[in-house]
Amino acid sequence: MILGIDVGGTHTDAVLIDNFKIRKKTKVPTDANNLLNSLLHVATTILATEDPAKLRRVVLSTTLSTNAIVQNKIKKVGMVIASGPGLPPALLPVPRHTCFVAGYVNHRGIIVTDIDAGEIQDGGAKLSQECIDHIGVVGKFSTRNPEQELKIAEILSRHFQHASLGHRMSGHLNFRRRIATTYLNSAIWDLYQRFVRDVLQFVHQQGITVPIYVLKADGGTFDVAKSADYPAQTILSGPAASIMGVLSMAKCNEDAIALDIGGTTTDIAIFADGVPLLENLGVTIEGHKTLIRGLRTKSIGLGGDSIVRIGPQREGPAAALGGPFPTPTDAMIVLNLTTIGARDKAVTALEPVARQLGKSVEATAQQIFEEACGKIVAAVRSFIEEINNQPVYTIHEMLAGRKISPKTLYVVGGPAAAMASPLGGHLACTSFIPEHSEVANAIGAALARTTAELTILADTERRLLTLGEEGIQISIPSQFTAEEAIAMGRERLREKAMAMGATEEDLEIEVIENQEFNMVRDSYRAGKNIRVKVQIKPGLISGFTKEKTL
Amino acid sequence: MNKKLPKTGLIFFPAFDWAISPTHPEREERLLYTQDQVFEEGLLDFENIIEYKPGLATVEDINRIHICVPRAESVITESHLISAGGAITAAQKVMTKEVDNAFALVRPPGHHAMKVVHGARGFCNVNIEAIMVEYIRRHHGPKRIAIVDTDCHHGDGTQEIYWHDPNTLCISIHQDGRTLYPGSGLTDEFGGPNALGTTINVPLPPRTSDEGFLYVLENVIMPILADFKPDIVVNSAGQDNHYTDPITNMRFSAQGYARLNERLAPDIAVLEGGYSIERALPYVNVGIILAIAGLDYSAIREPDYHAEALRQSEQITQHIERTAAEIMMLWKKRRDMKKTIVETNKYLKRKKQIYYDTDGISEQQEETVRICEDCGGLVMIDSFADTGTRIFAVIIPGQSCPVCREEGEVFFDRLQKGKYRHPYFQDRDRNIYITK
């Protein structure tokens, strides 16, 4: 049995899956003031008459980190930044308590300017005076050489409870995002440690001994104990849970569109050959552009409860359900596309709009409904176009460019039944409404596999190989090849994923970047610059095949 | 940040799988570290910097400006269609006002490619700026366009293409041709008889530093641009004036390049040369992008930059001031020079020897232009390359007058293939390209 729980903003869902069939599902309102309570409550409820010994794994997806950031219930963080020449501080996303220190690593990972221990001590002392316990240390190009970040953290280790290091956040280049990600990681550090402690205590009390996983923004899972080092990875796991849920219910092997039409927003995700697409660099939350690996979604401010003719904001539920303003849901009720609510209230709500338009209430409802569909269709089209027009950097990719062209549409959310078919029509897709979609998030969490990524830069002139996000540098011979880099990448990624809780059967490793450049200096080949990225892509745990039906 | 920032389009195409040869300066690795720096600085995350995928230029785009021998497909590879396409994409985004300016950070370069193309010279096969300029005119109407070539090498290809065009101003600042490839670009190369003054050359002595470049910008380029009043300013943004460039001898810096671009404010910048791929390009390109996007570039600096060590000598300063004064004198007299040059001739001929260093081809050319008061003038070219190929081309200029057009059409009609492998006819206004 697998237990999947998703603590969302409004509801907490739980599913118990036995031999890939849904054995039980529960949905309760979330206690916004105590997310952990909601989690424990739903777990206790669903397990009440079950034998915990039959559990194989438990996966949690929680909006804890997301909420903390959205509601600004985060810790004061001090940042220590070695930016070197480049963008001025004013163009860097640094918080109020930031100290800039000397030190610079260049694109090759060569230290060009040394750090200054005295300056770092002084900077640290100033941050301490501000009652700061948590710091983030970020250097430019630190994924090419972590040495300076490590040294800075060591110098400051006595003064602070914890330091998040930039290079550990991601192997991608992007100093500004590295700063933002490291900052968030530190800002939710305390909160997340408490969560992990409480969860572990609860499972212990319940006599659960199986692995406990937490869902990440990329739709993959990691062991709860391991997750304590990277709280930032759990940000925005909610949308990822929903997409993984659709994936599990959809039996999808081809290009497809997934829509989650909620009350206030519609989230769009795209599958390429049945695999959800990832953000190029990372997710964006509350204006923080990060390096947190995440599923690529586009959110538009249009849902069933949007106010008609005023815009995306939600002022309450549909008029038919007692809300203050007419909404697309009211239009659907008038058109008899759904049986919820009181139709007469919906009609009354639409009457003033109809008078303004000089149309009948039915015609008005039809127009509102079509406009809502039209907006979603336009957003989906522009999202696909954006994906298909993504820049590429080789002639081969330019000429061989694969285009996404979905023929299948999955729709979940309240208005799914009413909207799926017309949306499918506009998008030239066959539309489906997956079963159990009301607990899609919990199912998605339950069945998601462990994902991981690893970045390798081998510089044979310097005889040095760097594992970006691992902070490891290894000596290599000058004849080191791309094949050897890939082999090492696979092996290291395997170890990394196993440590994160992956099972042997789920280690589907793929090479996502493999580039090799001759480095020529003074007309001679000085060495090779080899760049390799390997990953375990988001997907479902093994044993759950596409033929299985929940 | 109160002022509204310009929207900047960035077309980045490093062609990571294309090289002239494995150890050639124009190789896969060239923009690798530039990409690293642009990515690490996170420039693409700025709201006002938008990256676009390059389009593919077409053979038609090339034939609008070049006479490729025997035909376009034989002298180019896909990489040229992409780099020219990248320049075109930059222009499209600017012309449709999707962005305020754009930088095509593409390779391979093009500013040494001339009208007739028998092969590659100076690492260039086709002239990507000229292809872009004619694309703009074809799709957005006749425009006055200024091309400011800041590559260290004389932009001889662009100069040759627009030698007779009074509507295209070509200004090239470069290391003095007596000390560097291709050897041309002296101040007295000043444009054809129908277009005197719309070719400007500013040869600079070796070891010129930021100060010298910016002096020329303020005292030559900006005043001439103000007089010419272009609709569009293009920067052929070569980056080999940098003090670390391995094949030139100048002392320009990333700060200098950024300041130049801020002041020049080109509508479109197109990358040309620049082969100090580790020590210069990453910083120069980040500086240029920030400058045209209106962002603070003051902290951009090469890790090994020392202003004092790069300062130019007093002698160089004086030399540059004299050159600038001489050019401005010529510029003021440009309208009076035609009579002396033309005398009573109806046509003028010039003979050219063109060497294609990259491909090792020599070409002899005789170019005839019709003296015309109303347009750039009908151009006819008899070209013979040591590959054994001889061709003849009749070129009707853009915005041509009826007389030049008719004369060209009649001449081409009567032209026998004879000793020529192909006679070519090119009419830019009507987008006609015929090969006999």
Image (tube, rainbow, N blue to C red):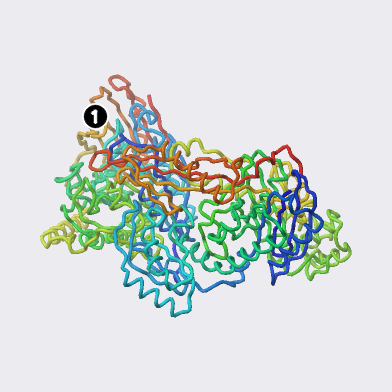
What quarter of the picture does the C terminus of chain B occupy?
A: top left
Residue ranking furthest to the left: B315
Kind of residue sitting beneath label 1: Ile
Tell me if I can see residue A265 in this picture: yes
The reply, left or right, for residue A97 in relation to residue A367 is: left
Observer-nearest of A544 and B391: A544
Q: Is residue A537 left or right of residue A445?
A: left
Q: Position of residue A510 (x, y in %)?
A: 53, 40
| Side of B21 relative to B188 (left or right) | right
- Seen from the viewer's position, the closer of residues A135 and A254 is A135
Name the spot of residue A193 as percent of width and height, x first: 58, 66
x and y percentages locating residue A544 in the rendered image:
69, 41
Q: Secondary structure at mark 1?
A: strand
Quadrant of image for the N terminus of chain B: bottom left
Q: Label 1 marks which chain's residue? A: B
In the rendered image, which residue does mark 1 sit on? B361
Q: Name the residue: 47% across, 39% down.
A: A398
Q: Report whether residue B400 is seen.
A: no
- As drawn, the residue found furthest toward the top would be B418
How packed mark 1 is, by other alpha carbons closer than 10 Å (few <14, some 14-19, many 20 or more), is: some
Q: Residue furthest bottom?
A: A129
Q: Residue at x 29, y 38 (%)?
A: B123
Q: Nearer the viewer, residue B123 or A112?
A: A112
Q: Is residue A172 above or below residue B64?
A: below
Along the line of sight, which residue is nearer the eye, A50 or A421?
A50
Please state the horizontal and vertical placement of residue A51, each as a whole percent of the image. Answer: 78, 53
